[in-house]
Amino acid sequence: MKGCVTILFQITSLLIILFLVIYTFSLQSKIRKLEEQQDLHFIGDEDLEKQILEMNNNGSSLVEMVKFVRNETNLGLVPAKKYVDKIIHNNLSS
């Protein structure tokens, strides 16, 4: 009888762990989608662009500029980096 209880406990534990793993992946997927939506809906600010270019001209690192954009806009890491890259690239192209 004790062996059945132990096996039942192990199976229940494995099912709970499996559920938590699936739920974690589901949440990560939702976070990625929200970050993409946030990236698509963000419209750049001219003053923010000027500040980024000024930081770039003063030798600030990419990390510092991305942190600055994240603090100013509440964008996620990836959208903020894409935004900074776009501003710097557009400045170099013109």
Image (tube, rainbow, N blue to C red):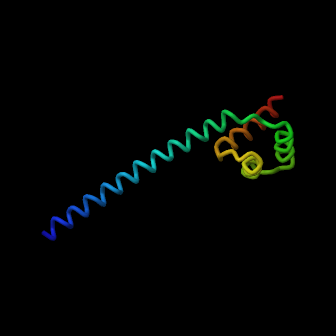
Placement of the C terminus among the 4 image quadrants: top right
The answer to whether residue 11 is left or right of residue 74 is left
At horizontal 76% and vertical 52% (from top left) the residue drawn is 64
Q: Find residue 47 and report its image quarter.
A: top right
- Farthest residue toward the bottom? 2
The answer to whether residue 66 is left or right of residue 21 is right
At horizontal 34% and vertical 56% (from top left) the residue drawn is 16
The answer to whether residue 27 is left or right of residue 19 is right
Nearer to the camera, 66 or 93: 66
Nearer to the camera, 91 or 28: 28
Q: Find residue 79 and report its image quarter.
A: top right
Placement of the N terminus among the 4 image quadrants: bottom left
All told, the count of numbered labels is 0
- Farthest residue toward the left? 1
The answer to whether residue 88 is left or right of residue 58 is left
| Vertical position of residue 41 compared to residue 55: above or below | above
Instruction: State the image coordinates of residue 14 (x, y, percent, origin top left).
Output: 30, 57
| Vertical position of residue 29 compared to residue 63: above or below | above
Instruction: State the image coordinates of residue 70 (x, y, percent, origin top left).
Output: 72, 48
Instruction: State the image coordinates of residue 72 (x, y, percent, origin top left).
Output: 77, 48
At horizontal 83% and vertical 50% (from top left) the residue drawn is 59
Instruction: State the image coordinates of residue 55 (x, y, percent, origin top left).
Output: 84, 47
